[in-house]
Image: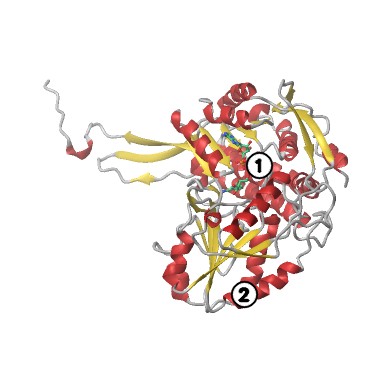
């Protein structure tokens, strides 16, 4: 399907402003954003961007919507998300095609991202009847001690380009069942996916009398729009996904007003391959984790920590697989590696390869791929043998570069794995139960995700997703991540005729 047909079907073709509050497409005075496909530079659309000042209008509208939505029973709020999941099922292929055109994902990964939206909707529907608080034993007679979870208020969502639909849905499906409106500042590299998700949600909201239109807004803009969200007092929770420098800036702004932030930032993910590993399994996991999405996942495998006895064998197998990887147009059914998001990303890739050479690395198979569509930035996934302390290994380059590091003892492998500033995803391939349990235990991987005999990327929505250290500490998606989107009230109810004080304190008044 051609892009103009996709945009028409998703209701985005006529949107010329980046400020969309509910049904209102509001004129803005920001710069014009020309959206082009990373596949081949095809112009997709153009619109005027919203500015930081426009954010205040979206916040006012969301605050009014909140007053109404917070009183709607949670299971009825879940019904809205059930219908949204249905509409996503109907539009899965079309929205998936837009993801491919706008950010260059291969079709199966693009549709997988939409499936992830559907999955989190299903999860959120069930959750809408399970926003449980605890009942706690009171130390006082005839007293009930309990906690309730209440809606929090408008949630600001700042998102990265590489998951242009799923990350918003992880946040918004939960926020909406929790009773919170959402304001979305998508990446300026993926605004059309954002507008499409919003338009599909509006189709459901329009037919839902209890839902105010202003439950959902999109603010397409640059960094200043994100900064305005971070500073807005009317937004009690800012969920921000992106690079570590972005997270530091947003976290500081939200913290300065004592708001809550949920930060999902860059990773530097590693896999340990031990002597007992099933190598065939490990190799499949390595290749998917390292080159899937052209190395542009936060969970992409960036460091392979392999036992010295296996290193030569593994490197030679990976080299031969890497040589035959199908690179090119992601819309072709056989392609596994699509383009990088833009030329700046490809230049960062070139620079890292150059630096790795200077820092003692041996580069295999890297370089530009020139047989792909013209006007796209295509690179060959690279393998680099290097020491663990090289500076390039400490930082995330958002491209398909896999560092290979050898180790001698298991303790050394864990130390290398944890010896970076980021802490998102990690994996071990081993058939030794002791190694597996040590890796998952308190002195093992220090990451938010620690896998055994599967790769670092491709998480399911049922678990809490996020990482430690510079990855930001946030958790979203499954498990009890919903608690981020609500406020907890502890209630103590006295149904006695006496007024006993806690801790046995006496405070008797004289008659
Ligand atoms: P980015 O940091 O450049 O941009 C992310 C978003 O933040 C964009 O919407 C951008 O406009 C906005 N932004 C940038 N600076 C800002 C500021 N100072 N204040 C407010 N908003 C600001 O990231 P990107 O290049 O779009 O995405 C790639 C990065 O995102 C990688 O580091 C990747 O690991 C990370 N990422 C993390 C996760 C996760 O769940 N941990 C998921 C996806 C991507």
Kindly identify the residue that appears in the image at 53 percent across and 79 percent down: 309
Question: Pointer 2 and pointer 1: residues touching (CB < 8 Å)?
Answer: no
Residue 488 vs residue 146, the one in the foreground: 488
Q: Which residue is mark 1?
A: 81
Disc 2, SS: helix
Q: Nearer the viewer, residue 379 or 279?
A: 379
| Residue 320 rendering spot, x and y as whole percentages | 72, 73
Q: Which residue is mark 2?
A: 314
Which residue is found at the position 73% from the left and 24% from the top? Answer: 24
Q: Is residue 57 visible?
A: yes
Secondary structure beneath dot 1 equals helix
Is the CB atom of the residue marked by disc 2 within 8 angstroms of ligand 1's nearest atom? no
User: If you read the primary sequence from the N terminus, does the residue marked by circle 2 or circle 1 appear first?
Assistant: 1
Q: CA distance from mark 2 to mark 1?
A: 46 Å
Residue 157's x, y, as percent? 60, 36
Could you say which is closer to the camera, residue 243 or residue 201? 243
Question: Is residue 342 visible to us here?
Answer: no
What residue is drawn where x is 37% and y is 35%?
A: 491
Residue 102: quarter of image:
top right
Q: How many marks?
A: 2
Please indicate whether residue 511 sits to the left or right of residue 292 in the image: left
Q: Residues within 10 Å of mark 1 (few under 14, many from 20)?
A: many
Does residue 278 sit above or below 233 in this rendering? below
User: Is residue 446 placed above or below 319 in the rendered structure?
Assistant: above
The percent position of residue 384, horizontal first and vertical second, equals 62, 64
Q: Is residue 406 left or right of residue 138?
A: right
Quadrant holding the C terminus: top left
**Is 104 positioned to the left or the right of 287 in the image?**
right
Residue 32 vertical placement versus 44 (above, below): above
């Amino acid at each position: 399907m051609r892009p103009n047909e996709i945009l028409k079907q998703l209701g985005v073709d006529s949107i010329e402003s980046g400020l969309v509050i509910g049904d209102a497409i509001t004129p803005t005075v920001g710069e014009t954003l020309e959206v082009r496909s990373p596949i081949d530079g095809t112009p997709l659309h153009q619109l005027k961007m919203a500015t930081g000042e426009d954010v205040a209008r979206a916040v006012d509208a969301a605050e009014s919507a909140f007053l109404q939505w917070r009183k709607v029973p949670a299971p009825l709020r879940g019904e809205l998300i059930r219908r949204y999941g249905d509409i996503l099922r109907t539009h899965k292929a079309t929205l998936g095609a837009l993801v491919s055109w706008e950010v260059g994902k291969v079709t199966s990964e693009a549709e997988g991202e939409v499936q992830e939206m559907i999955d989190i909707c299903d999860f959120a529907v069930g959750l809408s009847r399970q926003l449980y608080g605890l009942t706690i034993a009171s130390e006082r007679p005839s007293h009930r001690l309990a906690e309730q979870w209440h809606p929090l208020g408008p949630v600001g969502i700042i998102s990265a380009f590489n998951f242009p639909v799923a990350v918003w849905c992880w946040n918004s499906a939960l926020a909406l069942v929790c009773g919170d409106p959402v304001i979305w500042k998508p990446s300026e590299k993926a605004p059309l996916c954002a507008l499409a998700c919003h338009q599909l949600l509006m189709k459901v909201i329009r037919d839902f009398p209890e839902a105010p239109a202003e439950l959902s807004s999109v603010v397409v803009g640059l960094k200043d729009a994100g900064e305005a969200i971070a500073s807005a007092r009317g937004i009690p929770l800012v969920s921000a996904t992106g690079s570590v420098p972005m997270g530091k800036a947003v976290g500081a702004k939200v913290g300065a007003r004592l708001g809550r932030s949920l930060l999902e930032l860059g990773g530097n993910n590693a896999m340990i391959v031990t002597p007992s590993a099933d190598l065939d399994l490990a190799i499949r996991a390595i290749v998917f984790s390292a080159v899937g999405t052209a190395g542009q996942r936060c969970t992409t495998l960036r460091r392979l920590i392999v036992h010295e006895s296996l290193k030569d064998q593994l490197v030679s197998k990976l080299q031969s697989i890497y040589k035959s990887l199908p690179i090119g147009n992601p819309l072709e059914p056989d392609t596994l590696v699509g383009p990088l998001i833009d030329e700046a990303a490809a230049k960062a890739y070139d620079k890292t390869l150059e630096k790795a050479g200077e820092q003692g690395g041996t580069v295999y198979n890297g370089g530009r791929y020139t047989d792909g569509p013209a006007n796209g930035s295509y690179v060959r996934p690279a393998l680099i043998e290097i020491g663990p302390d090289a500076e390039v290994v400490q930082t995330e380059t958002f491209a398909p570069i896999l560092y290979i590091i050898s180790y001698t003892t298991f303790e050394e492998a864990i130390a290398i794995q944890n010896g970076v500033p980021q802490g998102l995803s990690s994996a071990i391939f081993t058939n030794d139960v002791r190694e597996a349990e040590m890796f998952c235990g308190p002195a093992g991987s220090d990451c938010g995700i620690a896998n055994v005999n599967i790769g670092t990327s491709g998480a399911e929505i049922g678990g809490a997703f996020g990482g430690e250290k510079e990855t930001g500490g946030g958790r979203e998606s499954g498990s009890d991540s919903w608690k981020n989107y609500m406020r907890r009230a502890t209630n103590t109810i006295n149904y006695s005729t006496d007024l006993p004080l806690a801790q046995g304190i006496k405070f008797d008044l004289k008659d």
